[in-house]
Every structure is written in structure tokens, then in C-alpha cells.
Amino acid sequence: MQKGNIGVTTENIFPVIKKFLYSDHEIFLREMVSNAVDATQKLKTLANKGDFKGETGELKVYVKVDKDKGTITVSDNGLGMTEEEIDKYINQIAFSGANDFLDKYKEDANAIIGHFGLGFYSSFMVSKKVEIVTKSYQEEAKAVKWSCDGSPSYEIEEAERAERGTDVIMYIDDDCKEFLEKSKIEELLNKYCHFLPVPVVFGKKTEWKDGKQTETDEDNVINDTTPLWTKKPSELKDEDYKKFYRELYPMSDEPLFWIHLNVDYPFNLTGILYFPKIKSNIDLQRNKIQLYCNQVYVTDSVEGIVPDFLTLLHGVIDSPDIPLNVSRSYLQSDSNVKKISSYITKKVSDRLQSLFKNDRKEFEQKWDDIKIFINYGMLTQEDFYDKAKTFALLKDCEGKYFTFEEYQQLIKDNQTDKDGNLIYLYAQNKEAQYSYIEAAKNKGYNVLLMDGQLDTPMLSMLERKFDKSRFTRVDADIIDRLIVKENADKSELDKEKSDNLSAIFTQQMPKTDKTEFMVEAQAMGENSMPVTITQSEYMRRMKDMAQIQPGMSFYGEMPDMYTLVLNTDHQLIKEVMADSEKATAEQLKPIEAEIKGLRAREAALQQQQNGKKPEEIDQSEKDELEKCRNDISSEEQKKKDVLANYGKENSKIHQLIDLALLQNGMLKGEALSNFVKRSIDLIK
Ligand code: ADP
């Protein structure tokens, strides 16, 4: 028997492995199984080159759990190791000194073990003792057994092993007992070894017999050794891709389409990316692109390797050229990775482009589902925007789709305002904004439907990208002012009359938290609605943005501001105006006369003082002016009270306000109930 110390310079390498890799314990199995797979593949290579003349037989890897003994064994019939090889490959941690290891390690826990410098030693994350029993393929080779209990010393002795190959026997630590559960190992094999290129056997297949699950004689192979991405696209049918997708994400709907990636220069990369059908945000979280390295699962966090917006896609990427033993930040600056990322972007945009060109109808059918990916890409990646702007679509409220170019042509004649700005009208909700959409259509305008999650930032971006263009929601103003074609004639309304009318309505508007109403009288033609509620584009859009952009929460806190527009051309409003004039005239007359007098006085006083220097105005003059102003406001308050009192009792006014609110889905609770009661009274 030979004893020795493992060639690690730091005494406490094992505690380090155990402690720091705590969260990634489970990868030990991936490491052991991929070593076993490598051993079988190396043997195959030797056989192909003629260096191994014997029978390779059926190359397989076996994983066994013995709960009683507390062991997990990974066996292979690969090339095995001689005693010298054990010394060289196992005893010397050849590739990186321990200090190196620790240094790199600090950067990124998972990555360092990831590929695969210390692969074998990861077994000590879960084991108190590890044994290797191995027999080399070389003629006359003797079987040897290596064992190590987690201290830096090991033992090596002769052993019995009938056939070529290696067993790695892990004596599982007491605090890692969960790995002795069959279901746990099954889960890990499924996660990490599902597509390994050599059959991996875990127990026997079972079948339902005599009322219970019974083991059969057949090996239970847990992996698919030739996953779809390793095959030639020309040999595959749509159904193959769909089937593979179901295998990857059993709970998901059918994918919309897919892209088979395949390059071997200047880097190696294969894979299949799927555009998923997203039902909810949860789907986006749960299913992710899986990254493989020569069919060994590495991770499902591909940030930095795949462009940000494409991390929302599903599928697999397999590349031996992605450096895995480095930190994420390093990854992003790696030139190979950059090339990979731009290759993938290009592939995706080419595919979309050709789909658009070759089958516009199908592209349109899928647009609503793929729009979120494309918009995300356009918003976050300039080069993708430049490609996508030719095939990205806009959809109008009637469900018609247009490219940017087509849409511009469509609206340019009728929707250009007097300053030469092209006005894109849009709705965010066809139901809620129904009457505004109708009004716009009656004017011959087209209205876009912008109801997607990313539409608000999207239209803000398009406003910047397009020349002289503005996006305006259909309810941002009354129809005549949405697109101002010529300088409007100044309204002929009597100012005092319309001010009084506005004042009456203003005081009857509902007082709700975080909602403010302005009232405005406007001649809008006798066929337009008597009352309309509008909400200015700027403020509303800022608030929309605040919802998706945390940095803008300031706007989120602002009240919603609406304008109630009274159409003074409408018969009903005319009546309200006439009635209220009549009803309040007597009370208002003295007040208005008083105000008139006070204003004249205020003007005269102001005039006097204007001629003087500040130090020449004495206190009594100042006091007089101030008193005059106070008198004016108290008279105005009186006037308001008169108007408010009148409004309070006027059911027509309340009915009009409520109808406007109702049309915008803003009439609720007590106000709604009052409206219903009042309506009943009115028709009684
Ligand atoms: P890596 O796999 O990255 O080389 P490991 O620490 O996992 O690093 O393994 C070190 C070496 O030990 C391997 O390169 C291989 O030569 C040898 N080895 C490990 N496991 C086996 C095995 N099951 N059969 C034959 N050789 C093995």
C-alpha cells in the first residue's frame, strides 16, 4: 500500500471546497458523471485511432445509490486509469494551484468548478470519503483502489476489478443524506445529464404489474444521447422541434417558431431557440434558455452570453467556447462571447425578417405574441432596432397591421397638423376609449392600438426616432384639438358667461383623492357630445412610464388630472346656461356690480401707486389696496357660493357630469348609486 499527500499546496483545500460551494453542492453529480462520460469517449477515440485494439462493447455509465451503505457510485467502462495516471490526474491538482483556485474562486462560485478544473474534487462537497476503483484499458494493467477521507492524504492499493473502467464510490456525509434519496438523484440526473452523449443508467425500468410498480430487467437510461440540436436542420421536421420543446418545457404551449443555431467558425455553437407563447409573466420567469457545454448542462442563467432581450426566449445553447470558469462581468467583455451574442442577434433578426418577407400573413398572426420580444429588443439594442424597423408592425384598432413606413403613408395626408407634425393617434383600451376612437374615425383618422406591456416606452422612443412626429392618445383632447389643422378662430363665447358656467360645474365635480378636474367651456359644434372628459397626453404618459420605471415614481405620486369640456354649442349646455343665468341673475346682480366697482377701484389705486417709487408709497395706501383686493375675493367667494348652491340642486348638471364620468369608467360607489337613483327619478 502506498500513502501520500495530494499535491495541493494549501492544507485546507477540502474545507474550502465544502464551505464555499455550499449552494452548489449538487453539481458533484454532474462532475462525476461527465468524467465517466469523458472516459468512455476517450476510449472510443483510442479505438478509432487504432490505439486500443480490444472490444469497446456497449459504452455506458451507471449511477447507483446504496442507502444502507450510504454510498453513491458512478461507474463507467471507459479507459480507466493506471496507478501512474491516478497519481498524475488525481493526486496532483494539475491545472491550477490551490492559490490560483482560491483567487479565482472569490470571483464566482459556480463558475470555477463549472468547467471542470477541479471536477473530481467536487465529490468532497458531499462525501466524507471517496474511493476510486479503476482498471486501465492498457494490456496487463492492474486494478487499483485509491481512497481519501477528505484530508489532504490518500491511500492507494491493489484492488479487484474484472473489467476495464472506473468506479467512483462516494461515502455521503451525514449532513448530505438527501442525496441518498432515489428521487433526488433522479432529479439531478434529469437536470444535468439529460442530454449527455453516452447512455447513463440509473436502476431498472419499472412497469405496472399486479397492482404495483415492479422493476423490469431493462436498464433505465435517463438521457437522450442525440438531442435535437446536434442534428442537421435539413433532417428535421416541424414536429421534431415541437416534440423537443415539449420535452424541455412540458407545461408550456406550443412555441411560435424556432431558430436552429449552428456555427463552427470563428467559434463553436449549436442550439435551438424558441419564441414561446407567453401566457403570463410567470412563464417568462420559469422557463429559461439552458446552456450546455458538449451536452453537459451548465446553467440556465445566460445573461451576458445571450443579448438581454433574447434571454426571454426558450431553448438550448451548446458551446465549448464559452469560458465558464470566469465571472459574469468578465464574460461580458470576452471577445468570443461578444461575437456569440451578436451572432445570435443577427440570426434572430434574419429569421424574423425572412418570416415577414415570405409569409406576411403568418407573421401578422404571430405578431401579438412576438411583439413583446421585438419591442424589448428595439428598446434596448440599437443594432436590433435598425434591423427590426423594417418588419416591426403597428396594429390599428380594427386589427390591421402596418409597417412603420406603411403607416406613415397611410396617415400622412390627413393627420399632419398645421406645424407639419405627423400625429399618431392611439388607444390603450378599445373598450374604455370607445367613444373617442369613434370620434376620431368619424374625422377620417386612424387610431393605433397600443395595449402591449412595452407600448408606452415604445411610442416614446418612436417619437424620438421618427422625424416631426407625435403620439397622442385619442382622449388627450377634444377631437378638434387632437390634430390642429389651422389656427383656430378665437371662441366667440362671452367670457363672463362661460366662466360662470365652468364655475357651476367645477364645484359639482366629485372630490376624490388623487384626481383633479378642470372645467372648460368650448364651442364644439351642436352634434358633438355635450360633455367630454380629456386627459392631457404628457402627464398621463409620465404616469404610465412611472408604472414600469421605478426611477419615475415621482410622477406616479401626482394626481390624475382631467379636463371636463362643456360643449357650448350643444342644446343641453345652452339650456343649462340659460336656466342658470335666469335663476341666479337676481342674486348675482348686486355682487357683480360690487365686483365691478371694486375692480375699478383696484385699478385706480394700482395706477396711483405705479407712478411712485416704493419708498414713496405710504402704509395707508398699501392697506387700502390690500383691503380692496380682499373685498374682491370675498365678493367672488359669494358669487361662487351662489353658483354652487344653484348647481347643487340642479339634477341636469349632475346628470351631465355623471354621464361624462360614466363614459370613462370613472363613476363608482356612492356617486354611481346616486346617478342611478337620479336617473330613475328623471324617467318616472
Ligand atoms: P477534468 O475532468 O477537468 O480533467 P477532473 O478533476 O474531473 O478534471 O479529473 C481529472 C482527471 O482525472 C481527468 O482529466 C481524467 O484524466 C481523470 N479521470 C477522472 N475521472 C475519471 C474516470 N471516471 N475515468 C478515467 N479517468 C478519469
Image (cartoon, helix red, strand yellow):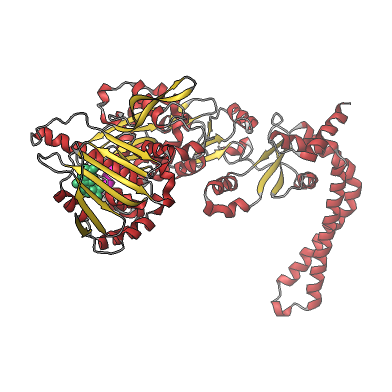
336 inside magenta stretch: yes
Tell me what residue is drawn at x 36 percent, y 21 percent: 239
Tell me what residue is drawn at x 82 percent, y 56 percent: 636
Query: Which residue is nearer to you in this view: 293 or 216?
Result: 216
**On screen, residue 198 above or below 159:** above
Q: Looking at the picture, how far across and down is residue 114, in whole percent?
A: 31, 48
> Is 240 left or right of 669, judged from the image as shown?
left
**On screen, residue 22 above or below 618:** above
Q: Looking at the picture, how far across and down is residue 666, in whole percent?
A: 71, 39
351 inside magenta stretch: no
Q: Main secondary structure of the magenta part?
A: helix
Q: Looking at the picture, how far across and down is residue 301, in whole percent?
A: 38, 45
Residue 523 appears in the figure = yes
Segment colored magenta: 335-342
Tell me what residue is drawn at x 25 percent, y 46 percent: 132
> Is 254 left or right of 473, judged from the image as shown?
left
